Image (cartoon, grey):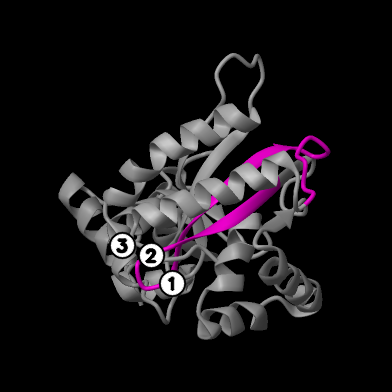
């Protein structure tokens, strides 16, 4: 049982850093969420102090609150992880293509990477000269029903796809239908994540033929031309194919 002294706020900055690091080390590929009680037990502190630590880490983007008791890695951690996994090369190579895609379509273009458990936005470009643009927060996690998330599931590993689908419950059938459509058309569409916002995404492949990233366009619902042979989709797929080629892919599926 923690003592009253244990449950008090940390007395020094070093202790705060040490305990914050302990919390972050609790996460792994097999443990993507932690509970307040887990943290209290791990740090041998009271539940109130554990809650304060989690809230502080969440306020800075290190963690993200799932519900009243559970937390998972936040957008700051996810963004750093994705960038480190692929290295800076892909972002550097992608940025000129993103800028061109944004200018050609007049919409916000986004580069997405996979963290091992979800997609995350790591770079974006907005078209110049528009008074209003859609802004995408870098490091923002993108769920399995986002256009980018769907693309990683459609072209990614069967194990990741099945693990993700198993968590979806009643929406699994709808997502599976969208994945089939994506494989047939070469792109994904989503209007279900944020009210009034639509996105389309196309896969980017590496030299081994595996999906390594996504290019996406984000706009208000009804603005994007999502016809398979429409200008927006044509430009999107061409940009994704161009990045695939620069990364060594022999073909862009």
Q: Residues within 10 Å of mark 2 (few under 14, many from 20)?
A: some
What's the residue at 34%, 57% (across, down)? Answer: 247
Q: Position of residue 113 (x, y in %)?
A: 45, 57
Please report contact status of discs 2 and 1: CB closer than 8 Å, yes or no: yes
The residue wearing badge 1 is 210
Front residue of 14/98: it is 98
In the image, the segment drawn in magenta is 199-227
- Foreground mark, 1 or 3, reads 1
Q: Is residue 68 visible?
A: no
The residue wearing badge 2 is 206
The residue wearing badge 3 is 85
User: Which element is circle 1 on?
Assistant: loop
User: Which element is circle 2 on?
Assistant: loop
In the rendered view, does 236 fall on the left or right side of 214?
right
Q: Residues within 10 Å of mark 3 (few under 14, many from 20)?
A: few
Q: Position of residue 130 (x, y in %)?
A: 63, 16
User: Which element is circle 3 on?
Assistant: helix
In magenta stretch: residue 194: no
Q: Earlier in the sequence, mark 1 or mark 3?
A: 3
In magenta stretch: residue 205: yes
Estimate the spatial distance between the alpha carbons at disc 1 and disc 3, rounded to whole Å: 14 Å
């Amino acid at each position: 049982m923690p003592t009253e002294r244990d449950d008090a706020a940390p007395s020094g900055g070093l202790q705060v850093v040490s305990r914050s690091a302990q919390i972050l080390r609790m996460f792994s590929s097999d443990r993507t969420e932690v509970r307040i009680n887990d943290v209290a037990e791990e740090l041998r502190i009271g539940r109130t102090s554990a809650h304060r630590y989690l809230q502080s880490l969440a306020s800075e983007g290190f963690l993200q609150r799932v519900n009243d008791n559970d937390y998972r890695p936040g957008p700051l951690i996810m963004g750093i992880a994705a960038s480190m996994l692929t290295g800076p090369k892909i972002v550097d190579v992608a940025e000129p293509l993103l800028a061109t895609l944004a200018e050609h379509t007049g919409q916000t273009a986004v580069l997405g990477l996979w963290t091992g458990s979800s997609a995350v936005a790591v770079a974006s470009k907005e078209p110049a000269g528009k008074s209003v643009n859609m802004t995408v927060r870098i490091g923002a996690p993108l769920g399995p029903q986002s256009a980018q998330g769907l693309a990683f599931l459609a072209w990614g590993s069967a194990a990741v796809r099945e693990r993700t689908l198993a968590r979806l419950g009643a929406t699994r059938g709808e997502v599976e239908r969208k994945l089939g459509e994506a494989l047939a058309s070469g792109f994904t569409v989503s209007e279900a994540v944020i009210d009034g916002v639509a996105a389309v995404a196309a896969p980017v492949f590496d030299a081994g033929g595996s999906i390594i990233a996504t290019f996406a366009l984000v706009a208000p619902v009804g603005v994007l031309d999502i016809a398979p042979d429409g200008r927006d989709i044509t430009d999107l797929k061409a940009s994704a194919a161009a990045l695939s080629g620069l990364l060594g892919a022999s073909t862009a599926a």
